[in-house]
Amino acid sequence: MQVFYESDADPALIRAKRVAVIGYGAQGHAHALNLRDAGVDVRVALHAAARRAGQARDDGFTPISVVEAAQSSDVLVMCAPDEVMPDLYAAEIAPHLRAGQTLMFVHGFALHYGFIKPPAYVDVVMVAPKGPGKALREAFVKSGGLPCIVAVAQDNGGGEALAYSYAAAIGCGRAGMIASTFKLETEGDLYGEQAVLCGGLTHLIRAAWEVQVEAGAPPELAYFDCLHEVKLLSDLIHERGIAGMHLAISNTAEYGEYVTGPRIIDARVKEVMRAVMADVQSGKFARAWMEEYRNGAPNLARTRAAAASHPIEAAGEKVRALLKSATVNN
């Protein structure tokens, strides 16, 4: 694995460009603010009805249209949501592209699965921070950074160097800029989200909470056991690795992991994980999600509502209120 740092990048490259960050959501706001603080000529581009326009103005930007950004900018940073990006690109960006411009992606979804097919005369690169925009901004303000993945799909003579200059400008050079590909970033990101971070973890928490409540535990205490302490353990794993986490827990807890973990995550679960990876790599998941979005996302709305109404949420509200009250009183 090749990792580069600030000293490997030329900050003058990105400072010589007119940059437009398209979108001001989870990633977009952090990229725009970090770029501005790094001395880059950056503007924010939004569609007419964008919900984040007010926030962008509050942060000192004067939003421009996506068409204007495509016509007048050297670097277009694609921070719109995955599902929105293909239609936005086709209608408001593609007709105005010219030689010498750079399309900068922060996640490879739209390009890797072929929903966007840029012309050969533009550079196509990716700088994908390994964390949410909020964390990227907070780290930057504290003179730190998040690691990122850097990938190059098309380079007409300066795209790769510009990508590293951009990554350093948003703070990633302080932590490590990892050379990779659109394929590896996209498939790894989707698989990790589904198998562990968003899919596996949340369903494991709900199922464990349900079993504990069914066994007679008060919902709030089960919430502490099955959800609240997840952060405490994940922080230890983040800081020390899994083996290091073992040194910070009781022998009883560690023994319980070894004898019970394989009963929960068994060979059948691993086979399901392989099927999930296959769906990601084949594009099956991507096609299903885009079809769902273009049909108005009815299944997303239904499952989101079901998740929000799960009884663990009511227990969580009580626990968080209790913890907040304790903090205020102390």
Image (cartoon, rainbow, N blue to C red):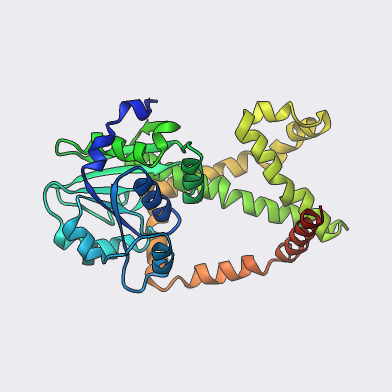
Examine the rendering and report whether any part of residue 212 can be seen. no
User: Splitting the image into 4 quarters, where does residue 324 fall?
Assistant: bottom right
- The residue depicted at 28 percent of the width and 39 percent of the height is 163
Q: How many marks?
A: 0
- The residue depicted at 42 percent of the width and 66 percent of the height is 52
Examine the rendering and report whether any part of residue 22 can be seen. yes
- Counting from the top left corner in percent of width and height, residue 15 is at 25, 42
- Counting from the top left corner in percent of width and height, residue 116 is at 26, 55
187 or 141, nearer to the observer: 141
In the picture provided, is 316 more to the left or to the right than 187?
right
User: Splitting the image into 4 quarters, where does residue 155 fall?
Assistant: top left
In the picture provided, is 101 more to the left or to the right than 30?
left
- The residue depicted at 42 percent of the width and 61 percent of the height is 289
- Counting from the top left corner in percent of width and height, residue 135 is at 51, 46
Q: In the picture shown, does residue 174 fall above or below 327?
A: above
The N terminus lies in which quarter of the figure? top left
User: Splitting the image into 4 quarters, where does residue 29 fall?
Assistant: bottom left
153 or 167, nearer to the observer: 167
In the picture provided, is 226 more to the left or to the right than 288?
right
Considering every residue shown, the one lying at the far right of the view is: 216
- Counting from the top left corner in percent of width and height, residue 92 is at 22, 65
